[in-house]
């Protein structure tokens, strides 16, 4: 038992080292950028959960309603005794719909980069579903090539990637992720994918610039995390959240922007920011039917079925390995 805290400390040190290296590299390059996955520390994950409840953020409630209407069909297509693997599980709210529809589910495997958030969610699921085998995996799903658990007793593996998180990846990254996921899910594997659709630009803008400022807090929490974990001295009042739709690329682009000339120290290194200089944190690509088909085909999947809401704001797509 004495070894567990040491292992946890080592893992936390490794996570912090990766964070430091990525931040320093991102601030040294031009244009500056920090990978979106580092937005999701414990506080960032909680803020994102709050974003999902905002009136402007149609994505979560629309996808949830589609899942409620399609979950019986998804369970039937998945078949008996399957293992459900969720990428970027967060609080596993939507996955509960699948868990409850898949009555003979062999295992639920939530994969998330935020260790504290993952452990809290896994404990709640074990309490609420005492017969369900819950096997949390703390990892970056972009590099996960194998699962460190034995699922040999399960039937087919079903991936779950909701929230249009696929849109946070560039087209090259999205294809690479789905190819890696197809390999991890194995022969006969399938993927339930949430995809945000192209729509009115005003609606897109409002979804990422909410009136309550929760999305701004989420973006600026990355600066707070750097201050806490990397001995940085960001003045959060001197930076602002900025998000806008790029119609040429078909994506929302998110940054934090310097409001004045300033110099910031991060992990012992100094970085000068000009007034108006931006640091990229996240993309959110939007798709049409042709884009979804191209993405699936490029990763070795075929589209077995697609469900959408009546306004065609969002789509849930069932992909099968070719």
Image: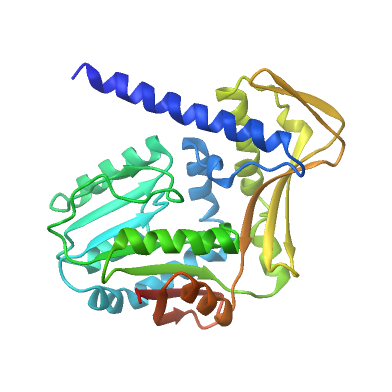
16, 115: nearer the viewer: 16
Taking the image as shown, residue 128 lies to the left or right of residue 230, namely left
The quadrant of the image that shows the C terminus is bottom left
Q: Residue at (22%, 48%) from the top-left corner?
A: 134
116, 190: nearer the viewer: 190
Q: Residue at (69%, 51%) from the top-left corner?
A: 254
201, 304: nearer the viewer: 304
Q: Residue 84 appears at what percent x and percent y?
A: 27, 60
Taking the image as shown, residue 64 lies to the left or right of residue 128, namely right
Q: Residue at (58%, 30%) from the top-left corner?
A: 21
Residue 272, compared with residue 190, is above or below; it is above
Q: Residue at (25%, 23%) from the top-left corner?
A: 4
Q: Residue 118 appears at what percent x and percent y?
A: 36, 42
The quadrant of the image that shows the N terminus is top left
Specify the quadrant of the image occupied by residue 305.
bottom left
Q: Is residue 125 visible?
A: yes
Q: Residue 13 appears at what percent x and percent y?
A: 44, 24
Q: Residue 57 appears at what percent x and percent y?
A: 58, 61
Specify the quadrant of the image occupied by residue 100.
bottom left
Taking the image as shown, residue 66 lies to the left or right of residue 195, namely left
Q: How many marks?
A: 0
């Amino acid at each position: 038992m004495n070894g567990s805290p040491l292992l946890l400390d080592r893992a936390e040190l490794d996570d912090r080292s990766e964070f430091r290296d990525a931040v320093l590299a991102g601030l040294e390059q031009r244009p500056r950028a920090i990978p979106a996955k580092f937005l999701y520390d414990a506080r960032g994950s909680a803020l994102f959960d709050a974003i999902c409840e905002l009136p402007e953020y149609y994505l979560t409630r629309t996808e949830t309603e589609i899942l409620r209407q399609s979950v019986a069909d998804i369970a039937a297509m998945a078949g008996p005794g399957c293992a459900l693997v969720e990428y970027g599980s967060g609080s596993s709210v939507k996955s509960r719909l699948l868990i409850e529809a898949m009555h003979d589910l062999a295992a639920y495997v939530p994969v998330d980069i935020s260790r504290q958030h993952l452990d809290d969610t896994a404990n709640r699921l074990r309490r609420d579903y005492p017969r369900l085998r819950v096997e949390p995996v703390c990892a970056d799903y972009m590099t996960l090539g194998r699962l460190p658990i034995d699922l040999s007793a399960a039937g087919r593996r079903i991936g779950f990637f909701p929230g249009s998180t696929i849109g946070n990846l560039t087209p090259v990254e999205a294809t690479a992720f789905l190819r890696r996921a197809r390999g991890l899910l194995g022969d006969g594997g399938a993927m339930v994918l949430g995809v945000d659709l192209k729509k009115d630009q005003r609606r897109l803008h409002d979804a990422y610039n909410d009136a309550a400022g929760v999305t701004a807090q989420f973006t600026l929490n990355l600066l707070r995390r750097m201050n806490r974990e990397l001995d940085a001295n960001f003045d959060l009042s001197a930076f602002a959240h900025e998000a806008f739709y790029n119609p040429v690329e078909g994506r929302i682009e998110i940054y934090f922007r310097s409001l004045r000339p300033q110099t910031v120290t991060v992990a012992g290194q100094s970085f000068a920011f000009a007034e108006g200089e931006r640091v990229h944190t996240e993309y959110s690509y939007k798709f049409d039917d042709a884009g979804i088909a191209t993405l699936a085909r490029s990763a070795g999947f075929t589209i077995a079925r697609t469900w959408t809401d009546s306004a065609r704001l969002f789509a849930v797509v069932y992909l099968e390995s070719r």
